[in-house]
Image: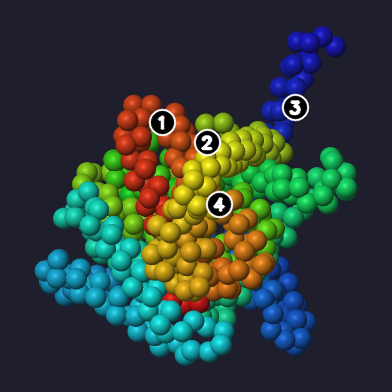
Amino acid sequence: MGPEKAADQDMISEDVELHRSGKFAAFYNKHIFWFHLVMWLIATGFVSAAFALQIPKGYNQENLILGLVYAWFSIYMFFCHVPTTVVTKPWGMLISMIAKPVKMVNPRLRSLLYGAFVFAAIAATVFAFPVNEHSSTRLQRLYSLIGLVIFIAIMYITSTNRRAINWTTITTALLLQFLLALFVFRTKAGHDIFAWAAHFCEGYLSKSRYGTEFVFGAEIANSGIFAVGVFPALIFFAATVQMLYYLGSLQWLLRKSAVIFVNVLRISGAEAVVACASPFLGQCENALLIKPFMPYLTNCEMHQVMASGFATISGSVLYAYISMGIPGQALLTSCVMSIPCSIAVSKMRYPEVDEPMTKGEVKVPESDEKAANFLHAAGTGAATGINICLLICANLISILALLYAVNAGLTWLGNFVSIQELTLQMITGYIFVPISWMIGTDTKDLVAVGQLMATKIWANEFVAYMDMMKLYQENAISERSMVVATYALCGFANLSSVGMQIGVLSSLAPKRAGDISGLALSAMICGAMSTWVSASIAGMLH
């Protein structure tokens, strides 16, 4: 058979496959109600059998998660055939009815009263919880509350346009963040959900170990080398993200989540999508979701996009930190809390004064390079993961080398004036002591946590977390200090990330390179401030 005939045969085969898939799709769409009904009945039967067998054994997290998944599946199936307006329309009418008399109040007075009410509610809730041996004292809670107020005041004082600040957006974002923290710290369901999620993430990403053993052997896989333990999980996560993107699951989740923030916080669709994507994808990759809109973002939106990346870590490095012994529940909670917090902090520092192109609507454009199939998506994700691994490796080598070189020079100078072990972390660590106090660190650990925060800014959160766990394992810092420090360090806000974001975002919008460079340092500070606000709220509720 000649090459032309072979090509024709391949084309005929493809046409046959498309025809078959088209016939099945038409049949499925015609009888979709019955397909969904059968799927729901099967799921209901399975869940009923599972509960009948497991509930008599007593409560456990698995039953809770199974019930939540089944509830979500049932609601999804219901709204596949019933318009969501049956819920949203009455809800909108109720909100309009309640808001009508409220809107009669002067806007400035309304925002002031709303802010005062939320602050009073937060303060009353924090101090209402009883004090026991496993919780913080009321004095420690007061320190964290004062810290929260000071952080907000700093953002207001340094704002580029204080008159343009939308206080309703700021107050609502902080309220959402507090309610999420309250749900995790002070409710059994919240604690169990995030504990299960952390356990699931750790278990799922740990499966990369089998690939590591196959490629390098069990001896190297068990060696405890940082790169061998962390990088395979990172590659695996990157592949998972691309597979979810190929299936459309990630876009669906981001769209649904972003709609909430667009309607509740009154931000643009581009800002909402990036903020929701940051805990999954991290800095730089999150902006790829709005690549067509990048050249047209307002300065406020560009600042928010960058701040969202600085304010959280990504799922790709989550396993690395959990493997160090850092509580996965705290890391996951911090990542989710960063979504509303980064919006609040960025909108205070750089308020919106222009008209965003995506105001009031959520769009997640299709990827420029559509994967051919599931395996192609996995391979593309793995290739992306390799690039991220090499970038992390290069950054760690260069930054640590530079940091220790600077410290060697400072130590040499310190010896002339009888100051032993003078380092950059020691000097700036004392500068961060007030911030360490404001997030609720135990008094005896203020300097140590301050130095960890300084290490994170000068180097990165990898180095800071390694130092933190070393201190905790040596009983040099308390459990409370370790928990609040975990929140304070949980973000990419460091000097090396500034260069990364400028480089990537400038390539996506070359004509905005000047704006991006001018906003980068401010966005990094806002990202760091977001993690400190999260830490102060954790300090109030721990």
SS at circle 2: loop
The circle on residue 13 is 3
Cα distance in 3D space between marks 3 and 1: 44 Å
Read off the residue under disc 4: 421
Q: Tell us which disc is closer to us: 4 or 1.
A: 4
Q: Where's residue 158, x and y in %? A: 25, 53
Q: Considering only order in the chain, which callout, 1 or 2, is on the residue closer to the N terminus? A: 2
Mark in front: 3 vs 2: 2
Return the mark for residue 506: 1
At label 3, counting other C-alpha atoms closer than 10 Å, the crowd grade (few under 14, some 14-19, many 20 or more) is few
Q: Position of residue 324 (x, y in %)?
A: 68, 58
Q: Marks 4 and 1, how far apart in space?
A: 40 Å
Amino acid type, residue under disc 3 in the picture: Ser
Q: Position of 75 compared to 143: left or right?
A: right
Position of residue 10 relative to residue 476, above or below, is above
Residue 186 visible within the image: yes
- Distance between mark 3 and mark 2 Cα atoms: 27 Å
* Residue drawn at (40%, 57%) of the image: 431
Position of residue 118 relative to residue 250, above or below, is below
Residue occupying image coordinates x 19% and y 55%: 162
Q: Which amino acid type is shown beneath numbered disc 1? A: Ser
Q: Which residue is at a point 84% across and 41% down the rendered structure image?
A: 216
